[in-house]
Image: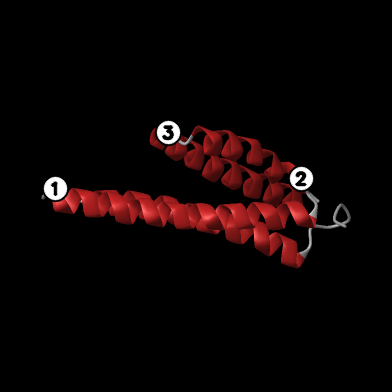
């Protein structure tokens, strides 16, 4: 079905974008093993098995918490220096929301079922 395929492509694209943003965040932090892990995990977005969707959803959920942790830390640092931090919170909150939506879509598609290619 064409609409099911479009849904899989949208879900995979959103998941890959979220993981690449996480990789960039880890690169900026100097956490190079996490950069490699985030990039390697993009392959899970293209696996249609339920275990892969669950694993991807879990990774993206952890990524959501990482974005929220980073937003809190960066905002606290800027506030302690007397600098504005509202824009930072809006941007990182948006990225956290995007990552959470990606996680939800990965889990939701697992709950609904993905068609004949699932286990």
Q: Residues within 10 Å of mark 3 (few under 14, many from 20)?
A: few
Which residue is outermost to the left?
Answer: 82
The residue closer to the viewer here, 96 or 63, is: 63
Q: With respect to residue 66, does 34 lie above or below?
A: above
Q: Which residue is mark 1?
A: 83
Query: Tag 2's secondary structure?
Result: loop
Query: Tag 1's secondary structure?
Result: loop
Residue 73 position in % (x across, y down)? 30, 52
The earlier-in-sequence mark between 1 and 3 is 3
Do the CB atoms of the residues marked 2 and 1 lie less than 8 Å apart? no
Mark in front: 1 vs 3: 3
CA gap, disc 3 to disc 2? 29 Å
Q: Is residue 108 left or right of residue 20?
A: right
Mark in front: 2 vs 1: 1
Q: Residues within 10 Å of mark 2 (few under 14, many from 20)?
A: some
Residue 3 position in % (x across, y down)? 73, 52
Q: Residue at x 65, y 56 (%)?
A: 106
Q: Is residue 47 left or right of residue 117?
A: left
The residue closer to the viewer here, 112 or 28, is: 28
Q: With respect to residue 46, does 62 lie above or below?
A: below
Q: Quadrant of residue 112?
A: bottom right
Do the CB atoms of the residues marked 3 and 2 lie less than 8 Å apart? no
Query: Tag 3's secondary structure?
Result: loop
Residue 117 position in % (x across, y down)? 87, 52
Where the C terminus falls, by quadrant?
Answer: bottom right
Q: Which residue is mark 3?
A: 30
CA gap, disc 1 to disc 3? 24 Å
Q: Which residue is mark 2?
A: 47
Q: Residue at x 15, y 52 (%)?
A: 80
Q: Residue at x 81, y 51 (%)?
A: 1
């Amino acid at each position: 079905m064409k609409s099911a395929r479009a849904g899989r492509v949208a879900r995979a694209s959103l998941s890959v974008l979220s993981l690449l943003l996480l990789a960039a965040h880890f690169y900026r932090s100097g956490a190079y093993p996490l950069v490699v892990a985030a990039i390697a995990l993009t392959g899970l977005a293209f696996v249609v098995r339920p275990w892969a969707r669950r694993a991807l959803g879990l990774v993206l959920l952890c990524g959501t918490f990482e974005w929220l942790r980073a937003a809190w830390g960066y905002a606290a640092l800027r506030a302690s220096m007397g600098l504005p931090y509202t824009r930072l919170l809006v941007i990182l909150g948006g990225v956290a929301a995007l990552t959470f939506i990606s996680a939800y879509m990965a889990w939701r598609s697992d709950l609904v079922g993905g068609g004949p290619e699932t286990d």
